[in-house]
Amino acid sequence: MAVMDGDGWTECAQGHRHWGLHGASGLLLVHHDELGVPYVLMQKRVWWSHHGGTWGLPGGARDSHEDAVSSALREAHEEAALDGDGLRVQGVYVDDHGGWTFETVIAESAELLAAAPANLESTELRWLALPEVGDRKLHPGFAATWGEVQRALRPETIVLDVANIVGARAEHGWWRDRLAAATRLLEDVAGLRLEHPILAQWFPRVVAVVEGAAKGVPSVPGIEVVAATGSGDDTIVAVVRAARPWERVVVVTADRALRGRVSELGAETVGPRWLLSQLR
């Protein structure tokens, strides 16, 4: 293991020449304004670089000891003096060329962070509104995947109707200790890599609503636990209502009445089987 051991040219199975012996990654920062318009931080590459003069993402070769997220954050710091403070990673999109991959790390920024070239690899960094991105001369690799990647820019929240899911899970004797059953469920979910139709790795915000005897569940890393003071259904509706208008919210429940209430607020719904099938 060595720093910068990923630097170098390689060729993929498609016969393309790429920079990055272990693949490469880039950071796609997205910010939604008060109207929900997404802005993306774009980098214009210096003329002498590979595909110079085109627009793409801050990024570069991944070292052998790095994962996609750590590599993308390091490159963004080196090229745009950005750090990871205040950013929320939403997921990783993988462009696989066969033996070589470029991993786009999508992260949400609460503001339009100030960014300027921090080394000689770029001439400009600019926040572009989503409709403006296609008007630029784009890096070929970015252009090839942009149509699909932009579909995953919205922040996403999964809301768990814990009582309903625990009942559907039907562990032996779960009704005798609802607290323990709820705790096991949340611990299992915290260690799960949820499936996403676009992203290879998906890191949604997960909100678990608990009620009754399960309200004493301990905190679980990566999961926001909300204890209902009254009706669990009413609390779930309140969580959905508090979401930002541009946010995708998915409620996991089989309760027909609750599904109707949250759907009226713009949320999507899936049954517990969607989650439980992944736990198996």
Image (cartoon, helix red, strand yellow):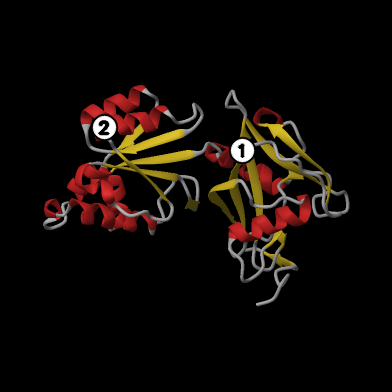
Vertical side of 140 occupied by 261: above or below: above
Badges 2 and 1: C-beta atoms under 8 Å apart?
A: no
Q: Amino acid at mark 2?
A: Asp
Q: Where residue 74 appears, x then y in whole percent?
A: 69, 59
Snapshot quadrant of residue 148: top right
* SS label for mark 1: loop
130 vs 190, nearest the viewer: 190
- Tell me if 122 is positioned left or right of 150 in this view: right
Q: Residues within 10 Å of mark 1 (few under 14, many from 20)?
A: few
Q: Can see residue 101?
A: no
Q: CA distance from mark 2 to mark 1?
A: 30 Å
State the residue at coordinates (36%, 29%).
238
Residue that badge 1 annotates: 110
Q: Residue furthest bottom?
A: 1
> 108 left or right of 265?
right
Q: Where residue 268 sits in the image (x, y, percent)?
A: 36, 32
Quadrant (top left/top right/bottom left/bottom right) for the C terminus: bottom left
Task: State the residue in front, 175 or 95.
Answer: 175
Q: Which of marks 1 and 2 precedes in the sequence? A: 1
Q: Quadrant of residue 240?
A: top left
Q: Position of residue 14 (x, y in %)?
A: 64, 59
Residue 7 seen in the current view: yes
Residue 146 appears left or right of 179: right
Q: Residue at x 55, y 51 (%)?
A: 92
- Rendered-image quadrant of the N terminus: bottom right
Q: Is residue 96 above or below residue 106?
A: below
Residue sitting at 71 percent across and 72 percent down? 3
Check disc 2 and report its element: helix, strand or loop.
helix
Q: Which mark is residue 205?
A: none
Residue indicated by mark 2: 233
* Kind of residue at badge 1: Ala
